[in-house]
Image (tube, rainbow, N blue to C red):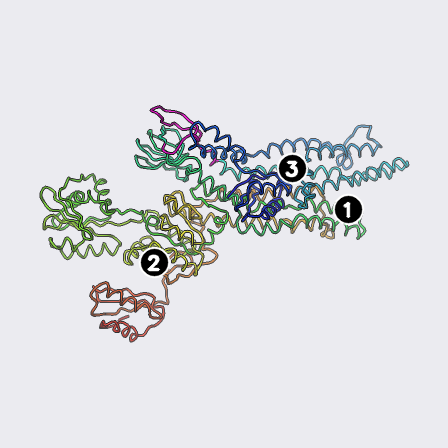
Amino acid sequence: MEQFTVTGMSCAACQARVEKAVSKVEGVKSCSVSLLTNSMGVEGSASPAEIIAAVENAGYGAALKGAGNAGSGAGGSAGAGTADGGAAAYQARLREEEDALRDRETPVLKRRLVTSLGFLALLMYFSMGHMMFGFPIPKFFHGNPVAMGLLQLLLAGIVMVINQKFFVSGFRSLLHGAPNMDTLIALGSSAAFVYSTVMLFAMTGAQAAGDGAAAAGYMKEFYFESAAMILSLITVGKMLEARSKGKTTSALRSLMELAPKTACVLRDGQELTLPVEQVRKDDIFLVRPGETVPVDGEVLEGESAVNEAALTGESLPVDKMPGDLVSSATLNQSGVLKCRATRVGEDTTLAQIIRMVSDAAATKAPVAKLADRISGVFVPAVILIALATTLVWLLLGQSVGFALARGICVLVVSCPCALGLATPVAIMVGSGVGAGNGILFKTAEALQETGNIQIAALDKTGTITRGEPRVTDLVPAPGRSSEELIRAAAALEQNSEHPLSRAVMLYAEEQKVPAADVTEFQAVPGRGLTARLGGRLLRGGNNKFIGENARIPAELLKKAGELASEGKTPLWFSEEDALLGVIAVADTIREDSPEAVRALRNLGIHVVMLTGDNQRTAEAIGRQAGVSEVISGVLPDGKEAVIRALQEKGTVAMVGDGINDAPALTRANIGIAIGAGTDVAIDAADVVLMKNSLRDAAAAIRLSRATYRNIVQNLFWALFYNTLLIPAAAGLYVRFGITMNPMLGAAAMSLSSFCVVSNALRLNLLKIHDGSGDRPGRHPVVPGESGKLLEPVDPAGNGDSEKEDTMKKTMQIEGMMCMHCEARVKKVLEALPGVESAEVSHEKGTAVVTMSSEVADSVLKETVEAQDYKVLGIAE
């Protein structure tokens, strides 16, 4: 996406005009203009020159972001070689974007307002103060109404010159056939000024004719103070709006300000302090305590605690040691770190975060289309309503002054700005809140649609679980100790690269058990390992391999079976012909996974776990995590097909972290990538969770729903405001004694945009990790039959209701000899109408059948016996 800076826009009508003009350029696929950040994102093959020309032809200015400084930035680093030219260009562009987001409007508007109010106060003193309250004036003006009129014309003219921007922008837009909010203001103020000037000339004619009474009567027809007051009040509103807009972009500016400016780099044995844009990939750099990490890198030497709150929002520092990765803009708190640069310039983590937040602000949420359609016709419609209002009152016999006041009031009370700001300010604040908490939405659409999730498909490995096996249980054989078991296991496993071996070694390190040297190490494929320790033969592997030489007690076999049913892998160990015991290893679930799953279900979301594990292991982990449904035996390339099937039941979010999750992340309605995952997964996702915590998935949904509510509130109040006040301004409520003068209309208009922006700023107070107010989504989903349903989902999300319409029957079956037999019986039973699931065990000789509707015993019996097994009995 190419991003441009657009100048000259003042309201939603301008925004719509620019979008329409650019969208007509050949090669442009999509165009999104942000009134909030004065930016435009364009996708397509059209050249920047063509796009800029289209914007200029529409009456506005445009420039490619970074075009002005990139060249000089790159040139400035030419001495360092071309490798860092891209980094220099990125830094230049970053400075330009940061500079563009600075609030320059407020100081200018403040000066305009102060000056305007000074002259307006004089004008109000001579017009309303003297006329209504008898304030004293110089004797020169006594009995000289023409002089009073000329003074008012002069003071009003000065205020109009001070606020000439409204007239330049408004009439230029009108000439281009695209009137905007400034057009309404300019027309309203000009109409009041011109009418008053005409009345002044009429006054001079009456005075020249010697009719002093008639000349004095024209004083009541002056609207000079209205012409000036309209501009001053609108400037008040513009200043308040600018200040509020400045606050909405503060999150993005803060991120940009985090970018380090210098780095301490080692070159030719010397420490050099260089601008960060001159740091090249693979450079060695130092980070001392209290310094920020300049670029992404890998720790080569040193240990320290690094505060990553700037990127993840997590306040607790993270310990770093050789081999660990560090990210740009994080703060080194203790020891000195020597690192190798792995990502520089726009490839750093910070740069990617800034780009995501910036892109989200430059794109549009689907709900914004309504406001765009309204804004496109709003200003022309208001002008027609104002003209019609004036003509109707004249035809009804009202005075020109009364009719003109009603028309002017319609012009100034209308507020297309409120409509134009309703969506982008909420999106910007919502994106900023997310970024501050380590949750990145790539587009405004992702921010809106995340709250509509009905089904959350969670990858097991690395998402629900840690992604690396850990030792969970030690079961020594009778007469043996845990220390003997782990010492032998460590000695045997130290030479193996298998993930289960690494789990054993990690546990031994934690227990401070040294691994003794062994000889004659050998790996027996599919069975286990052997080696000699002090001349004695050690074995490790499955129970069949160990049972060939050592006797395995029945109670230990039973215990191993229980561990296996919990999703753990039993590793058996022996020394010569004596059994040492069992070590259970499993990919353990993260501490916060059950809480995260519970939070998702409390939000009314059906949580599905996807895994390639066998059904028994998958169910054990699924129960620990508390998911609603488990789909096991899913091959890496099969996740995308599962997502497609789930989408038939509702809106699906896929949460994953691996390369094999990328197709599923892309296929899902919303792809959510765990931040510590692969770049491929992050690139394919719509939302990135930087903290590597599943709890943030629920937080992202809360933030999305709160942002959508805020947008709807903003749109409602913007539309309600215009629906209520335009008729009042037109004089439709005169019969009830309700009228509105142009000055009150201008004041009301000024406050409307300010209120919309202030409402959006309330999102900064949102506690996205607080689930106390969670409610199910708008479209609760009914659990499907795509996998193993662990427990029915409570519509309230509590997950502990019982399904009343299910029944179970236990079949005693003879003849099943192995797991293949189990699979055959299970398959034929689950194919029967009314059968939800069948739990088959060849060891117990049983099949527990769960049914959603009554299935006759005879049907169950015939189905199984057709497979050459014998049914001994069926019990409920």
Q: Nearer the viewer, mark 1 or mark 2?
A: 2
Q: Is residue 96 magenta?
A: no
N-terminal-most mark, 3 or 1: 3
> Which residue, given by chain and number where applicable, does mark 1 sit on?
402
In the image, 626 versus 438, the foreground residue is 438
> Which residue, given by chain and number where applicable, does mark 2 sit on?
631
Amino acid type, callout 1: Phe
Amino acid type, callout 3: Thr
Q: Residues within 10 Å of mark 3 (few under 14, many from 20)?
A: many
Name the outermost residue toward the bottom: 858
State the CA–CA distance, disc 3 to disc 1: 25 Å
Q: Position of residue 507 (x, y in %)?
A: 23, 43
Q: Position of residue 717 (x, y in %)?
A: 59, 49
| Residue at left offset 79%, top offset 53% | 396
Q: Are marks 1 and 2 in contact (CB under 8 Å)?
A: no
| Element type where label 2 sits in the image | strand
State the CA–CA distance, disc 2 to disc 3: 60 Å
Q: Residues within 10 Å of mark 2 (few under 14, many from 20)?
A: many
Query: Which stretch is magenta?
Result: 254-282
Q: Is residue 675 above or below residue 624?
A: above
Name the outermost residue toward the right: 210
> Which residue, given by chain and number where applicable, does mark 3 sit on?
235
In the image, 524 versus 831, the foreground residue is 524
Q: Position of residue 652 (x, y in %)?
A: 43, 55
In the image, 427 versus 68, the foreground residue is 68
